[in-house]
Image (cartoon, helix red, strand yellow):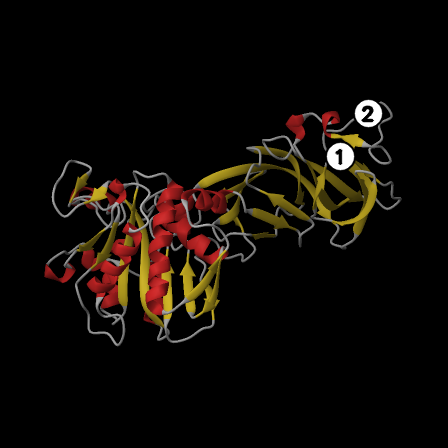
Amino acid sequence: MGYGLNRGMLKLYSLFFLLLLPLVSNAQNGFEFNLIQKGKQDKNTLLVVGGIQGDEPGGFLSASLLATHYEITKGSIWIVPNLNFYSIIKRSRGPYGDMNRKFAKLSKQDPEYKTVERIKNYIKDDNVKLIVNLHDGSGYYRKKYEDHMHSPNKWGQCSIVDQANIDAPVYGNLEEISSKVVKHVNNNLIKSEDIYHVHNTRTKEGDKEMEKSLTYFAINQGKAAFGNEASKNLPTHKRVYYHLLALEKYMDIMGIEYKRKFTLDPKGVYRAINDDIYISLYNEKIKLPLSQIRDIVKYFPIKKDGVLDFKASNPLLTIIKKDNTYVIQYGNRRLSRLKADYLDIDYEHRSVKLKIDGKFQDVKFGSLVDVKESFLVQQSNGYRVNVIGYTNKNKRETGVEIKSKEIPKHFSLDRKGTIYRVEYYTQNKFAGMVLIKFKT
């Protein structure tokens, strides 16, 4: 649950005090969170925080989609999609305790001290006027007890404020704003059980645990702050749907305008989360589509020193090295494991010729090429070519027409059996990769 935690569990968490696994990162900064700034920066900025607790994927996936699938055409948004990135990777509420209970007082010896101080500085920034902290909570919040899963003790499906009003230059009418958000969400419910309510925790009236939270810290800096909870009883993509409905209403209230790259319904959200994700490596000599990637990819070209330079399409994507295996992680999901084939890398950028369905094309390394019937790799004196999984009697992989049925499906990069690797080598160095995608 996002905010709620009984005192017994709090005592348990207090007994435990990222990165233990080496992280391969384009920023080389361990598991530090990203701050993504979108729009034209101004003094009316919305700060959206996801991932303060790593077992709440609805929250951090919503923030990541806001970062990757929205264009801000008017106004300013700052997005932190992965505040507690190590917690996300570990699929844990908090390996070092609940980060959302560290905003009142925190020892400098705490492993998360620098992270908490950094997000505090963004909250206090003069540009930021409103903060939304995204959570997934258990059950369904109701103001009166209905049953075990629908009661005042549950945290799912509600908009949270610490008090009705604060003394702030703008957006101080917290409960009124929260009511507008709730009304908008409730006009777009998937089913009636999912109804949202305003949940005023009345923190300063004696809730000692909520006094330690991010939102209570924010309102004491004179900033409007809200928690948004989606129910853990819902599938993740439906949680994201409700979070995005709420976020769009906050943007509307603040006069922030945007363009969205997908349809805001459960199917559209599911596709946006799962389909449009990839990682590119070695300055885009390799580009891996990840939506259907196999659990294990063998003999994958890795630079001899073990350092894997990559760019990710989504801030929740990263690669973690463990021995000779490189794990591709998307939030708290492991997508694939790359089994290393250590090689020197040739960084020269070139294009190669392929004959695609009877027509020759110049193709750059890192490309994914659609093929209906067959492809042919033109022989080149400069390269040795390996079409992964393909063999013939003449032991040739260039100058021959290759059809999908001639490559065993278990050599495909994807689980559907449609994408295959064509790797190029010059002398003893890996030069680049082209992916062939057979249309089904």
Residue drawn at point x = 26 percent, y = 77 percent: 169
Residue drawn at point x = 45 percent, y = 53 percent: 65
Which image quadrant: the C terminus? top right
Q: Which mark is residue 269?
A: none
Residue 168: give x, y in percent of width and height: 24, 74
Amino acid on which disc 2 is placed: Asn
Query: Which residue of the protein is positioned furthest toward the front in this rendering?
Result: 187
The tally of labels here is 2
Residue drawn at point x = 72 percent, y = 29 percent: 404
Query: Which residue of the protein is positioned furthest toward the right in this rendering?
Result: 381
**Measured along the vertical axis of the image, is residue 404 above or below residue 226?**
above
Front in this rendered view, residue 338 or 66: 66
Report which residue position mark 2 lands on. 392
Residue 398: give x, y in percent of width and height: 84, 36
Going from the N terminus, do you reach mark 1 or mark 2 first? Answer: 1
| Secondary structure at numbered mark 2 | loop
Q: Which mark is residue 387?
A: 1
Residue 357: give x, y in percent of width and height: 79, 38
Amino acid on which disc 1 is placed: Val
**Is 65 situated left or right of 99 in this image?**
right
Q: Quadrant of residue 302?
A: top right
